[in-house]
Each structure stands twice: as structure tokens, then as C-alpha cells.
């Protein structure tokens, strides 16, 4: 069971109060872009064993979206942060590096 | 105009904790920029209260105001005045990005009264309901069983809970079952 802290309302709640929204920080390739890039945006997702960035929605609480950084192998949550960003903030990256020194970094 | 009736018409059950369908309550959903002076003035005119802090609820003689999300408030007013107050708020916020909706008839309200109220809610809500973590003045939007709900305390032994009217009957049954005699811890 994951415990996530919603950065919008400050509540630390269990997984059942949230709804997962898939991989975070996707670039939304659309009409006019390279067809391979568009296909990858639609169908290809990272499936790492280890550090992963995800979108979550506090569905039973404030209803807002946010981002979470967690480990898919241990379910450890490194931190949650605002949805209004296209890349993880520095403090989240630092927290991950502190616990996973071998992690190769975002992207 | 037809006679407005609440979902269970004031039904109540007496288990270890008393569950009462609390009747009609005026409720207004107000979305907008909670730091805007216009909105603060409009809320003050409607319920005579200031904007509550994060996850807090303010109560006063004219009603209440609850923090629902970073851009949403729930105003608690008299049922008969809700439509007029909604219109007043919309008028006061003309020109500002906002939404004020009278949701009174879309909601059901329950009162959960008794020393075991915390235990009853804790059976269905994934929330720390210990007195240190949750007290008077706090509001929590969460789930009860599988139903979306929000609750707060009006005194040490009484919770008020709101949920959608469409699931009001199920909520009453769920709470009644959770409050069955002999189903709460013996130390209460």
C-alpha cells in the first residue's frame, strides 16, 4: 500500500484515496509531428524497475492532480510535487539521488 | 413550488452511536481565487466568516464555510436562503473568474452523535481520526466505504457528514451498520 502526500491539500493518505494517471512528463506529440514520435507518445511507456515518475489524482479528496516519484521495486515514495511542471524539481531529484546513488537521472 | 424533502426525511437509527439524516441544508459550491479581495468580501457578506485555512472549516451564527481544495469552498447556509445567497455571490464576483452553484438539493447531510463516532467513521475512512489528529475545526474530504464524503466535527461527540444525495440511502445504511450495538471497542 502506497502512502502519498497530496501537495495540493497537504494530506498524507493511503493509495485507495487516489487514482493513478500513468507515466508523468510525457511530451504530447500531435498532428504535424513525426509519426514515429506520435506513435511512441500514444503507445510506448517506460516500465522501469526502480525509479519512476507518475501522475496521480486525489480523487476522493481535493480532486487535484499531482506528480509522484517512487520506486516500482520497493514501493518507496521519494516525494510528490506539483502537476504544473514538465520535469521533476531539484529537491525531488536530490532525494532520489540520496537513496539511489546508482540512478542514472531523469530521462 | 413543490415541497422540498431531504433524501430520508430525517430518518434516524439508534445503535451504539446515533445516526440522523440531518434534513435540508443550504450548500453552495464556490470556486475561484481564494486570495482575491472580491471573493473574500463576497464570502464574508454571505456567511459572515473569513476564508478558512487549508482543510479547516469555520462556523458562525450565519452558517459555515469549509475549505474543499485550493480553489474551492463549500458554504453552509440556511436551505431557504441558498438560492438568494448564490445569486448575491455571483453578482459580487461579476467580472472575476469564478463559479458559484447552489448544490443544496444534490447533497445529503448526516449527524453522527455519540462517544464512538470516531470509531464508526474509522471503519470506512482511511483517515487518522484520533483526537490529536482530527478535531473541531478540521474538515476531511475522503471516502466512507466506497462513497465520496466529507465530514467535520461540531462538538466533541458529534460529526457532520455530507455526501451526494444519490447515495444518501446507502450511506445511511452503511453508517447504521457500522454503528451497530456491540460492534465498537469495549473501552468506549
Image (tube, rainbow, N blue to C red):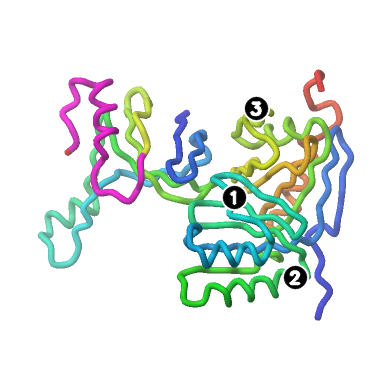
**Which residue: 86% across, 52% down?**
B11
Task: Residue under label 2, please give it.
Answer: B81
Give the residues drawn in magenta, as a range.
A81-106
Q: In the picture shown, does residue B85 fall above or below B53?
A: below
Task: Residue under label 1, please give it.
Answer: B52
Q: Nearer the viewer, mark 1 or mark 3?
A: 1
Q: Earlier in the sequence, mark 1 or mark 3?
A: 1
Task: Residue under label 3, please give it.
Answer: B132
User: Pointer 1 and pointer 3: residues touching (CB < 8 Å)?
Assistant: no
Question: Is disc 2 placed on a helix, strand or loop?
Answer: helix
Q: In the picture shown, does residue A91 fall above or below B32?
A: above
Q: Nearer the viewer, mark 1 or mark 2?
A: 1
Q: In the picture shown, does residue B57 fall above or below A101?
A: below
Is residue B106 shown in magenta? no
**Which residue: 75% across, 60% down?**
B62
Res B165 quadrant in image: bottom right
**Quadrant of the rendering where the C terminus of chain A is positioned:** top left
Position of A96 compared to B45: left or right? Answer: left
The residues bearing labels 1 and 2 have C-alpha atoms spaced at a distance of 22 Å
Question: Is disc 1 placed on a helix, strand or loop?
Answer: loop
**Which residue: 77% across, 45% down?**
B173
Residue closest to the eye, A7 or B63 = B63
Q: In the picture shown, does residue B98 fall above or below A19?
A: below
Coordinates of residue A97 in the picture (x, y in percent): 23, 25
- Mark 3: few/some/many CA within 10 Å (<14, 14-19, 20+): few
Coordinates of residue B96 in the picture (x, y in percent): 47, 72
Position of B136 compared to A96: left or right? Answer: right
**Which residue: 59% across, 46% down?**
B141
Question: Is disc 3 placed on a helix, strand or loop?
Answer: loop
Amino acid at each position: 500500500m502506497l502512502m502519498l502526500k497530496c501537495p495540493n491539500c497537504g494530506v498524507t493518505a493511503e493509495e485507495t484515496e487516489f487514482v493513478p494517471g500513468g507515466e508523468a512528463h510525457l511530451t504530447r506529440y500531435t498532428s504535424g509531428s513525426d509519426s514515429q514520435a506520435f506513435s511512441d507518445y500514444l503507445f510506448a511507456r517506460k516500465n522501469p524497475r526502480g525509479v519512476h515518475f507518475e501522475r496521480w489524482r486525489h480523487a476522493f479528496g481535493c480532486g487535484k492532480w499531482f506528480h509522484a516519484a517512487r520506486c516500482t521495486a520497493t514501493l518507496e515514495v521519494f516525494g510528490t510535487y506539483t502537476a504544473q511542471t514538465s520535469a521533476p524539481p531539484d529537491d525531488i531529484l536530490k532525494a532520489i539521488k540520496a537513496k539511489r546513488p546508482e540512478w542514472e537521472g531523469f530521462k | 413550488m413543490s415541497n422540498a424533502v431531504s433524501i430520508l426525511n430525517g430518518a434516524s437509527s439508534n445503535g451504539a452511536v446515533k445516526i440522523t439524516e440531518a434534513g435540508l441544508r443550504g450548500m453552495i459550491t464556490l470556486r475561484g481565487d481564494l486570495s482575491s479581495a472580491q471573493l473574500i468580501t463576497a464570502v464574508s457578506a454571505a456567511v459572515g466568516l473569513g476564508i478558512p485555512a487549508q482543510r479547516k472549516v469555520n462556523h458562525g451564527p450565519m452558517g459555515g464555510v469549509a475549505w474543499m481544495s485550493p480553489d474551492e469552498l463549500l458554504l453552509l447556509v440556511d436551505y431557504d436562503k441558498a438560492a438568494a445567497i448564490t445569486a448575491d455571490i455571483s453578482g459580487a464576483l461579476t467580472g472575476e473568474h469564478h463559479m458559484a452553484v447552489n448544490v443544496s438539493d444534490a447533497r445529503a447531510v448526516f449527524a453522527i452523535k455519540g462517544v464512538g463516532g470516531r470509531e464508526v467513521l474509522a471503519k470506512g475512512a482511511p483517515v487518522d481520526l484520533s483526537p490529536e489528529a482530527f478535531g473541531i475545526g478540521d474538515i476531511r474530504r475522503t471516502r466512507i466505504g466506497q462513497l465520496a464524503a466529507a465530514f467535520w466535527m461540531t462538538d466533541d461527540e458529534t460529526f457532520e457528514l455530507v455526501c451526494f444525495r444519490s447515495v444518501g440511502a446507502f450511506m445511511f445504511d452503511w453508517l447504521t451498520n457500522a454503528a451497530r450495538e456491540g460492534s465498537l471497542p469495549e473501552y468506549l
